[in-house]
Image (tube, rainbow, N blue to C red):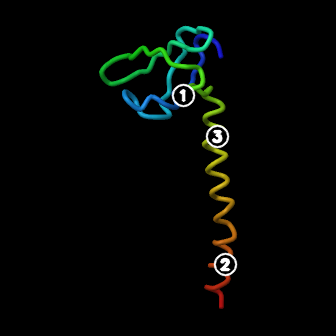
Amino acid sequence: MDIGNSVYLLTDHKTTGAGVPAVICGLYQRSARIAIEREEGTKILDVPLWDLLPARAYTAAILRACYWRLGNLGPAREKSRDRSRK
């Protein structure tokens, strides 16, 4: 991760919720300063690095979960089609 990269904040339940898009403004050894755009204005937070996920990895994880869900629905759909044909 570098300054200026897009990331997702995974755990900050108090102020933002989970899976919030942000941009890295500063990096330290074990934490990062991030900026989150909100309706009230920009929020700057210092968070541990393990609470951040690069935007590409976050998107890939969401897509993987969706495809997994669709893949598991495939056999159920085929069974329902077979029943309707009889």
Q: Tell me, for residue 41, which label it has, or none.
A: none
Instruction: Identify the amino acid type marked 1.
Output: Tyr
Q: Dots 3 and 1: beta carbons under 8 Å? A: no
Mark nearer the N terminus (1 vs 2): 1
User: How far is disc 1 from disc 2 in space, using C-alphas?
Assistant: 39 Å
Which residue is labeled 1 in the image? 8
Which residue is labeled 2 in the image? 79
Residue located at (61% from left, 36% from top):
59
In the displayed structure, 58 sits above or below 25; it is below
Instruction: Identify the amino acid type marked 3.
Output: Ala
Q: Dots 1 and 2: beta carbons under 8 Å? A: no
Mark nearer the N terminus (2 vs 3): 3
In the displayed structure, 42 sits above or below 74; it is above
Quadrant in which the N terminus appears: top right
Quadrant position of residue 53: top right
User: How far is disc 2 from disc 3 in space, using C-alphas?
Assistant: 28 Å
Residue located at (38% from left, 16% from top):
42
- Give SS at disc 2: helix
Residue located at (69% from left, 59% from top):
71
Which residue is labeled 3 in the image? 61
Tell which residue pokes out farthest to the bottom in this image: 86
